[in-house]
Image: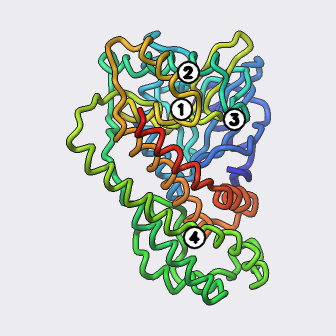
Amino acid sequence: MRTRFAVEDEVIQTAVLKNYGISIQKPVFLPNGDISYVYRIIGADGTKYTMKLFDKNTRSGRKGIRYLKFSLPVTWDMYDRGLYQNISYPIPDNHGDFVVDVDPAKIVLFSFREGKTLEESSPFCREVLEKAAKGIACIHDLTGQMHFRTMRIEDFDLSFLKGLETNMECLEQMQEEHHAYVMQDVFTDLGNLSEEMGEEMEPGEKAGVDKGMGTYSEKQIRQFTDPVIQVLPKKEKLLGFIDRLYRYREQIDFDPYDMVLTYGDLRGENLLLDSQGDLYFIDWGSARIAPREADLQHFLTEDFDFFLEKYKEACAGPFRPNSNLLGYYALRTRLSGLAGRISGMLYGSPDREQNQRDLECITHQDIGQWEELDRRIQQI
């Protein structure tokens, strides 16, 4: 999140002291994270922590809280039993729980590691690729040793695609009528499609109505919506990728594959190099039981042959990547990301910084790169 959550610092300090027995300095807000508010916490003894705050009143916040039920026990089990320790792990509170209720939110305290994330380091050098390959192979091979309290298993759900197609139709209407109030006309047909794709719009709410941030003029709305409409010339190609994703999904039913513990979101901002050159995996909110390819696909735009070679060397047994699974995950990741941003722009909050960030991601989508990526997958 780009802006602070509406809670006083004293409330956080009191909650941490009461539940963890840790006296902390004033929390420092960090403007990153997609579904949680992130803070740097420093104890009175100088110990540093990362704290994440999840808003119980938003769909994205509630979704993040649900996923904690799997990711927190898993990462604690890995760290506490010494199975794999190059990770961020949750700090148990005084009762041994990982989640603390601070109405209207929930907070989680995590370990902190000094270092630099790799957000701006892509393409990765071979040294980083080798470390990532070995780490991911180790995590995958831990599956049989883990003590899973709850399960989050890949279900190959593609229901978000219907919402993406609906929202592209909404954008077309906006382009034709040049009027932002058209969003309300289509919203009545969306039903619950936006549930997994953004925050809920209040009943009867229209673009331009005061939401506590001031009323948008039509000119302001045009400045807000026109860049989003740039995605429309790519519509036919996008529909082609949607069709291809469905075909990948159908083919997977006939392919054998392993189900392992996967990290799920191997972007550079979730990878950290410390001062000793050790690689850490620092955000486990997307972890689940899934095919290995769910993680491997993140490196298709890197030196994939080298990465795959090092991954195979580190695996406990023989492995051969499945091109249908790689194609499925590569396209689903990109299409779901696009769908979420468009939905957030149409029906999300009036956070100007977040909207600008989403706009940049939408308008800089390189569909040509998707084509090249798909060709590379077929050659594997």
Q: What's the residue type where badge 3 is placed?
A: Glu
Q: Position of residue 314 (x, y in %)?
A: 44, 12
In the picture of the structure, the residue carrying the numbered disc 4 is 347
Mark 1 or mark 4, which is nearer the start of the sequence? Answer: 1
Gap in Å between the C-alphas at discs 3 and 1?
A: 14 Å
Viewer-nearest of discs 2 and 4: 2
Q: What's the residue type where badge 1 is placed?
A: Phe
Horizontally, residue 1 falls left or right of residue 154, namely right
Mark 4 or mark 2, which is nearer the start of the sequence? Answer: 2
Q: What element carries label 3?
A: loop
Q: Is mark 1 on a helix, strand or loop?
A: helix
Which residue is at the front of the view, 105 or 94? Answer: 105
Viewer-nearest of discs 4 and 1: 1
Q: What's the residue type where badge 2 is placed?
A: Ala
Q: Is residue 54 above or below residue 302?
A: below
Residue 93 visible in image: no
In the picture of the structure, the residue carrying the numbered disc 1 is 299
**Residue 132 circle label:** 2
Viewer-nearest of discs 4 and 3: 3
Asked if the residue under mark 2 is in contact with the one under mark 1, i.e. CB atoms within 8 Å, the reply is: yes
Mark 3 or mark 4, which is nearer the start of the sequence? Answer: 3
Q: Position of residue 372 (x, y in %)?
A: 53, 46
Horizontally, residue 140 falls left or right of residue 40, namely left
Q: What's the residue type where badge 4 is placed?
A: Tyr
* Tally of numbered tags: 4
Gap in Å between the C-alphas at discs 1 and 2?
A: 10 Å
Which residue is at the front of the view, 31 or 220? Answer: 220
Q: Position of residue 239 (x, y in %)?
A: 45, 65
In the picture of the structure, the residue carrying the numbered disc 3 is 119
The structure residue drawn at horizontal position 47% and vertical position 17%, both measured from the top left corner, is: 309
Instruction: Assign the C terminus to one quadrant of the image.
Output: top left
Few, some or many residues within 10 Å of mark 2 (<14, 14–19, 20+): many
